[in-house]
Amino acid sequence: MKKHHILTPLIGLICILLLQVSCSDPWDEHARDNEGLTNEPLLERLEKEPESNEFMKLLRASGVDKVLDGNNAYTVFVPENSRIQAVASSLQNDAEALERFVKNHIAVSTHRLNASADTVRLTMLSGKILDFVNSEIDGAAFTKTDQAGADGIYHIITEVLAPRQSLWEYINEHKDEQNAFILSLNDYNLHDTAVVEDPEDYYLNNEFLREVGDVRDETRRFTYFVLNDADFIAEAQQFLPYVNYRNHADSSYAISQYHIVKDMLFDQMYDKENLPAMLLSRSNVPFPVDKSAISRSVRLSNGWIHFLDRPTLPIPNKLVDVYVEGEQPWGFSASVAERTFHRVRKDPFGELFTDIMVQNHGVSSLQVLYQTPRMYSTAYDVYWRALNDVQTNVFQQQVGIFEFDTRPSEEDPEQEVRDRIYVFPYTNVEQNNYSEVYLGEFTLADYSRIVPVLQGAATTANGNNTLVLDYLRFVPKLKTN
């Protein structure tokens, strides 16, 4: 028994020691490997590294070595000598390109090997942002890692990190029909209601940058498709009937071009191999991806460009439904705030939705006004969903479609009115009907915004002039000629 008590703690101590040895931190081992060198400046460490000889020549020639002065910590990604030798001659006579190239290999702060699947985005001194993931930096693998100096660390990598153009830089240098149109928006406003110019941002009025995607931004990732010149022109001509803008031919054609390019940019970054079968544009247009139509692809600092040898986006895909949410009114014909309710309801399938109900307000023909984005010049089928679930009676309401712009009233020039486009007849709001109700069709002759107006019954009797709306849905129709 006495011998047993002596051996038990001894065995436990041995086990603890074994666990400590087997669970040692690899970074502790790394620190021991660099023992005696951690107080040495990063530049001196790089000078002693055989595989950094060629990179150090460029570092000195560019003057960027002065940045590594010990006042801040940096991470230097050093391409192998052979990789630098392959590009050095192309940089010899361009001081600006040389500096940009060297800075694209240096990141602020220290970044050790990232072997996880989590992408770390590193901002380089060049201003470019590179993805650091799965033991790679921008696709370059590591041959030597985490070499510490007093003011930073360096890694040896298998490829050069040549600074790529951003999508905006590429568009500015390659002015084919599609890109030239995007650049024209720097000075040409598609619509009369342009944003006031900002002296600090010359491109504020460019509708593509403002409304589709700011492709100047290095922190974002994009996929952009480009049509050849003939196809871009043909697509714009084909879509022209849907964007008749005040019968102005030039403006209408420019707007048609815009509606082609706006659905060619996506906020995700996909190379050709990883493109999904379908993408969804910011305007909810489904974009079918046909990889066989991609003739070539270009990698950018903030995305990919894929060049198409034929159009792949059918016009019916672009004619997406327009929804007007009932609980988001633009205004009322009378003050009824105390009798206006935004309700949360659950449909028979368990889905929650929010609607508006204006009840017991005592106003005859009360109107609730809404507004839409610009809509295509075509015919529309119109539906509503309006839930009557708290009253025991059926009531009626109607929808009118009015122009967005106002004009002086003929009877009273001081008063502004909106021209009527179409008014649907009064329609019953049946009890506990969760289904859409078809109201009818109207035609919008001009590409413009509209003002849908929900109007109650022409009575002051409470219960009979109630208004309720979950949403209006406008379904654009394909032109047949």
Image (cartoon, rainbow, N blue to C red):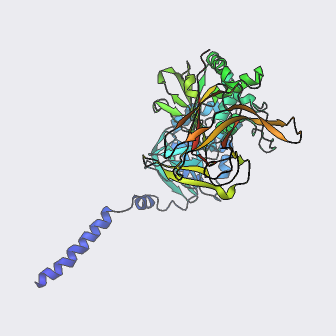
Residue 174, can we see it?
Answer: no
Q: Looking at the figure, which quarter contains the C terminus?
A: top right
Can residue 16 be seen by looking at this rendering?
A: yes
- State which quarter of the image contains the N terminus: bottom left
Determine whether 240 is above or below 373 in the image: above
Measured as percent of width and height from the top left, residue 74 is found at 59, 53
Instruction: Give the left or right position of residue 331, taking residue 197 as reference.
Output: left
**Residue 344: x %, y % from top left:** 53, 54
On the picture, is 121 further left or further right than 113? right
Please tell me in which quadrant of the rendered image residue 17 appears: bottom left
404, 133: nearer the viewer: 404
Q: Quadrant of residue 284?
A: top right
Q: How many marks?
A: 0
Farthest residue toward the bottom? 2
Q: Is residue 335 above or below residue 204?
A: below
194 or 62: which is nearer to us? 194
| Picture coordinates of residue 213, whole percent (x, y) | 64, 38
Taking the image as shown, residue 348 lies to the left or right of residue 10, namely: right
Side (left or right) of 425 relative to 272: right
Along the line of sight, which residue is nearer the eye, 228 or 105?
228
Viewer-nearest residue: 103 or 139: 139
* Image coords of residue 392 (percent x, y): 52, 51
